[in-house]
Each structure stands twice: as C-alpha cells, then as structure tokens.
Image (tube, helix red, strand yellow):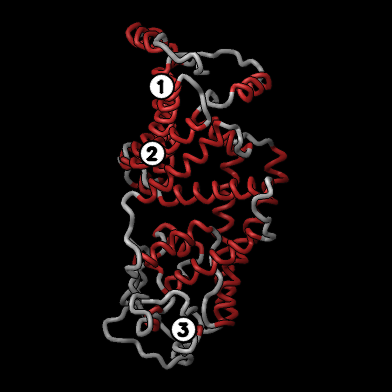
Amino acid sequence: MAVLGKPLTSKITCTCYELGHTWTPSCKKASLDVMLEVFKQAVKVYGSLYAIAGIIQRKNKDYFLKSFPAQLARSTIFLTTNGTLFITFFCLWRRGLLALYMANIATETLYRMVVARGWFKPVPHGEVILFSIASAGYLYLFRKNSLPKSILSTFSKLIGKDELPSTALSEETEKQEPVPVRHNGFQQQIKQNKSIQTVVRWLKDQSKHRLCQHKNSCIYYTLKGLLRNFCIGYGIQGVVKVLGSLTKIVRTPSALLQAIKHKDNFNLGAFLGCFVAIFRAVNCLLRWLRDKDDSLHGMVAGFLAGWSMLWYKSQTIALYAAFKLAEILYFKGISKGLVPYIKCADIIIYSLSTALVFHAAVVEPHNLRPAYWRFLLNVTGNKFAMMNRQILVPHLPNAANIQPNYWPDYNLLHTNLVKPPNATSVIKSVIS
C-alpha cells in the first residue's frame, strides 16, 4: 500500500508517457487534449448550472446577456486551467501534485485512505453524527439571528421564520408587502372535502405555548413542516432522477414511472420532512417544559433534527455543512479578535486539498468518492482512466485495484515496456 507522504521519485523511473498520458507520447499534445476535453465539459456543466439557477431565481434578460456569459467564462477558464496545469506539471515533475478544489472532497479522500490502511475503524453513522453536530451549531446561530444573510435566508425558507427572535421576526414582517390570498385548485378541493377540513381545523385549534410565535397549534405547526418539506424533498429528487434517466425514458417509457417511484425520492423527502418536524417539535416541547424561550433550544433541537439524515446518509452533505460552519465560526472569531486573520487562507486550503485529491486520483483512485471519480473521467474524456497504474504495483500494491488488468496500447517507438499476459486495453471507467 502507498505510504502517505513517502516520496516515490527515486523508486519509479518510468517516463510520464508510460505512467501518465499513455494515449500519446507527446507532452504538448497530452496537455492540449486534456485542455479541450475539460473546456467542453466545463461549458456543459457550468452552462447548465448557471442557466438553471437563473431560471429558478427568475433573473431578467440583462442577467443572461451580461452576467451569465461572464460567470460562464470565468468558471470555464478556472476548471480548464486546473485540468491543463495538472497534466502539464505531471510531465514537468513526473508526479501529480495538483488536484481538485474542495476541502470536503480532500477530507473524505483522506478518510478513505486511512480506513483502507487499517489505521482507523469507521464510526457507525459517522456522517450522521457529524451532520447533527453541525446542525446544532447552525440552528443555535439561527435562533440568535447570527447567521450570514444568505444562510439565514436558506434556513428561514426550510424551517420557517417562526423560530427567529421576535425582534428579527417583526422587522422582517415590516419589510414584507401584503400578498393577496390566492387559493389554488388543491386548496379548493380540500375545502370541498368536509372530513379533511374538519381534521385540519381540529389540529389548528389545539393548544400552543404562549411563547410560540407560530399562528396555529404546536401539533399543526409540526405536521405542516413535515408534510411540506417531504413533498419538496420528494419532488427535488424526483426531478433529478427523471432528468438523469431521460435517455433511458426515451427508449423505455416505463422508466419514467420507475424514476418517479425511486426509493431515493422518498428518502430525501423523509430526511427534509423529519429534519424540520423534529426541529419544530423539540423547540415547542422545550418551551412547554421550561416555560421560557431560549436560543439554546435551537442547539438541542438542531442536534436531534440532524439524526433525520439516517433516511438519506451523505458524507458530502455532512462534510460540506461542517466546513461551512467552521468558516462561519472562523470569521466570527476574527471579528471578535479571538483568532488571527490568515491572508490567502482559501488559496492555501484549496492547494492542499488539490494536492491530496489528485495524488489519490493517480496512485489510488479506488479511495476517491465514486461520483467524484466518474466526474474526473467525464471532465477529462476518460484520460484519468488511461494511466498505467500497473507500473506502480511493485511499489504500491493496491494502485491498480480499480483496473487490475488494464494495459495501454503504447507506441513501441517510445517505450520498452512489454504488455503482460492476460492484460487488456479495455478501460473500466466506472467504479462500483
């Protein structure tokens, strides 16, 4: 197995063609090939991302004529530069020291590497515990109205504004213009159904604590959060599944129903619904038990609500939440003079994360998050899969785990390497 941080340059004497850009012996052409592949994929990824975001946020024509092209160009150049410089420096230094950008990807990769070496045993539900701790921090700050505006707005839309301090809530109410009440067809249908209307009215009329800021009973307040966010989560994941299955749906129309009924849709809905319902219920319960309202209730409720991730476990969400909370706390510490301001800290973190992730992508890609490995293959036109990791096996026994029998079709004018028996040039591009 690879030893973290142990130099391999003195042991591995192969050329960059034999190890890295095996599809061409030319370093310049390899860099150009990667640049073109990454550029094409970057335009697709960022173009779709910014276009969808603009539509959802109802941006006007000026955004799509001015801001959209600028954002697309900046992001495309950024990703293209990363991919191109990686293969360029691979040739210059004979090993990859640059890599992708997100610290949570690097942390997850490092975790997988440590677990693979047997240095650490996975903690059961570790991502759920991490997310619960992060949720406790977020929702404590939410109850104190101390989150950055963008994040405060996100939580306000998710769990409602009724748990904000009364002063913040009154200020927000004053800013809002009165919206005329409109009843859609679904609401009209409920009104026509007397039995449902009776149950809803009964739930609304149950008791609530005098300090609760929500209009109706605590039971109705909790159930409304559960059902509303379950539908939102189910709908979001359902749309993702349908869009991801479009080509299959065109060939087999029955696949549409399968995408709509996929269990992931229910799981995300249950995650969001339970998260909001538990947070609301615990806050109400603590007001009843203590006969007081306290921002610390948000911490307790947030921690308990975080366990709703058992429905939809995600290391990505947990790590992102934890890193973002750490960033918020860091800047709060700076503003209070408790911690020093580190110039270019984001660039330092990015560089270290990049080095770790691309190092793993070269010598042990089986320890990368599967979705991220597929992203690397897609964005580079499968070039990462073409690396000959068989060369590394004498020094790093697990380096070729992801493609144990792969051997490139070398130009024999540029190498003396001999293709071993039973080797194949067929690339297995997706890990399980």
Looking at the rendered structure, the number of numbered marks drawn on it comes to 3
Q: Which of label 2 and label 3 is nearer to you?
A: 3
Q: Secondary structure at mark 1?
A: helix
Alpha carbon distance from label 2 to label 1: 31 Å
Point out the frontmost of discs 2 and 1: 1
Q: Are marks 3 and 1 in contact (CB under 8 Å)?
A: no
**Can you identify the residue that label 2 sits on?**
268
What percent of the width, then of the height, locates residue 135?
47, 40
> 10 Å neighbourhood of mark 2: few (<14), some, or many (≥20)?
many
Q: Earlier in the sequence, mark 2 or mark 1?
A: 2
3D distance between C-alphas at marks 2 and 3: 44 Å
| Three-letter amino acid code at the position of disc 3 | Leu
Q: Quadrant of residue 303?
A: top left
> What is the x, y in percent for residue 352?
56, 66
Judge whether residue 40 can be spotted in this image: yes
Q: Is residue 101 left or right of residue 126?
A: right
Q: Earlier in the sequence, mark 2 or mark 3?
A: 3
In the image, what residue type sits under mark 2? Leu
Estimate how packed mark 3 is, as few (under 14), some (14 to 19) or many (20 or more) residues with alpha carbons within 10 Å: some
Dot 2 lies on which element? helix
Label annotation for residue 289: 1
Q: Which residue is mark 3?
A: 8
Q: CA distance from mark 3 to mark 1?
A: 62 Å
Up-down: is 229 above or below 338? above
**Residue pictured at 40% horizontal, 80% vertical:** 408
The residue positioned 61% from the left and 23% from the top of the image is 169
**Residue kind at label 1, given as amino acid type:** Leu
Q: Earlier in the sequence, mark 3 or mark 1?
A: 3
